[in-house]
Image (cartoon, grey):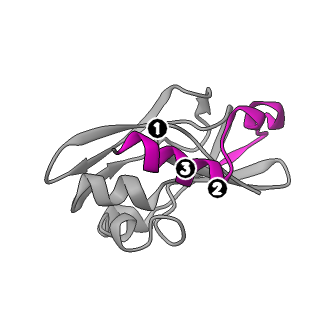
Amino acid sequence: MKKYTKDHEWIEIEGLQGVVGITDFAAKQLGDITYVELPKKGTDVIIGEAMGVVESVKAASDIFSPASGTIIESNSSLDDDPGLVNRSPEKEGWLCRIDNVDLIELEELMSKEQYDKFIKTSSK
């Protein structure tokens, strides 16, 4: 199950864990990503709160947690190759993994279809 936020993050749930990233739409809006600051392993995150930063040639943008839980891994590939987020934002360019995801919180997030409709109406 994959869910999306209005802040253009996604979370894909695998059991009680979630893989987090930014959407293709967000990556395109940011332009060439030059640096990614990710949360450290063991950090507790809360839904809607900033948990990292993505910097691009255009701007720096906070990454907001799409769910509450504990960081169990950050994508170390982004240290040497932050552009991976541009090339594959919803696959290899994932940002971190969260454990003990509060599944009830995910009910507030959007499906792929709802997100696609959201970006169409909000970008007019």
Q: Residues within 10 Å of mark 2 (few under 14, many from 20)?
A: few
Q: Residues within 10 Å of mark 1 (few under 14, many from 20)?
A: some
Q: Quadrant of the C terminus?
A: top left
* Residue 7, numbered label: 1
Q: Main secondary structure of the magenta part?
A: helix
* Of residues 58 and 79, the one drawn nearer to the viewer in this rendering: 58
Q: Specify the amino acid type for callout 1.
A: Asp
Residues tagged 3 and 1 counted as in contact (Cβ below 8 A): no
Q: Determine which residue is flagged by label 2.
A: 113
* Residue range of the region highlighted in magenta in the rendering: 97-123
* Of residues 17 and 122, the one drawn nearer to the viewer in this rendering: 122
Secondary element type, mark 2: helix
- Looking at the image, is mark 1 or mark 2 earlier in the sequence? 1
Residues tagged 2 and 3 counted as in contact (Cβ below 8 A): yes
Residue 82 in the image: state x and y as whole percent.
31, 63
Residue 3 in the image: state x and y as whole percent.
67, 49
Q: CA distance from mark 2 to mark 3?
A: 6 Å
Q: Quadrant of the N terminus?
A: bottom right
Q: Specify the amino acid type for callout 2.
A: Glu
Mark 3 or 1: in front is 3
* Residue 117, numbered label: 3
Q: Image quarter for residue 71?
A: top right
* Of residues 29 and 59, the one drawn nearer to the viewer in this rendering: 29
**Residue found at x 40% / y 57%:** 25
Q: Specify the amino acid type for callout 3.
A: Lys
- Looking at the image, is mark 3 or mark 1 earlier in the sequence? 1
Q: CA distance from mark 1 to mark 2?
A: 16 Å
Given the current orientation, which residue lies at the most extreme left position?
57
* Of residues 96 and 1, the one drawn nearer to the viewer in this rendering: 1
